[in-house]
Amino acid sequence: MPLILSLIISFIFFSQPNFEELRGEESIDFVVSAIDGGSSGELAKYFDNSISLNINGQQGDYSKNQAELVIKDFFKKNPSMGFKVVFRSETNPILSSFIGDYQSQEGLFKVFIKVSQQAGNLRIYSLEFVKA
């Protein structure tokens, strides 16, 4: 009898979905790749319908399309020489924050990304590039 109970518990444990998959942690990799490559179009795929942007002190709330143009201009003026995430705050499965370093010829920028999970999809609702 204990063997059957052990097998049942093992089956339940291994058949449960991985919590990391539920949170979509890997989905931030696409955002990192878009920023690293300086691709405003790829990055905009993850923007919420309305997004708060701060580009080196110039702040505003933008529609998805407007934000893409602002980011495109930033990437044009500051071509990417690399981007990496240096801090992740994912204590809440719905809201997460990330801090990264964006290197360009103009210098280093700290990047602050705030995302939410909506129906299993990652949506950036706040993005900041601040010169370090």
Image (cartoon, rainbow, N blue to C red):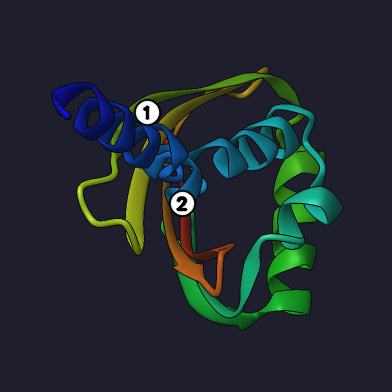
Image point (60%, 43%), residue name: 27
Which of the two labelled residues, at mark 2 and mark 1, occupies the earlier sequence position? 2
Q: Is residue 105 left or right of residue 96?
A: right
Tell me if 6 is positioned left or right of 37 in this view: left
- Circle 2 is placed at which residue position? 22
Q: Residue furthest front?
A: 1
Location of the N terminus by quadrant is top left
Q: Name the foreground residue: 43 vs 62.
A: 43
3D distance between C-alphas at marks 2 and 1: 34 Å
- Per the image, label 1 sits on a secondary structure element best described as loop
Label 2 crowd bin: few (<14), some (14–19), many (20+), radius 10 Å: few
Q: Residue at x 49, y 76 (%)?
A: 60
**131 up-or-down from 61: above or below:** above
Using the image as rendered, state which of residue 130 and residue 85 is in the foreground: 85
From what the image shows, is residue 72 above or below residue 20? below
Q: How many marks?
A: 2
Q: Provide residue 4's location: percent of width, then percent of height.
A: 27, 30
Q: Amino acid at mark 2?
A: Leu
Q: Amino acid at mark 1?
A: Ala
Number of residues whose C-alpha sits closer than 10 Å to that of mark 1, classed few (under 14), some (14–19) or many (20 or more): few
Residue extending farthest left: 2
Task: Quickly name the residue at label 1.
Answer: 132
Looking at the image, residue 66 sits to the left or right of residue 95; the answer is right
Quarter holding residue 13: top left
Q: Residue at x 34, y 49 (%)?
A: 97
Measuring from the top left, give residue 61's x and y in whole percent. Answer: 51, 81
User: Is 87 on the left or on the right of 78, as rendered?
Assistant: left
The image shows residue 85, relative to residue 65, as above or below, that is above
Splitting the image into 4 quarters, where does residue 14 fall? top left
Res 57 quadrant in image: bottom left
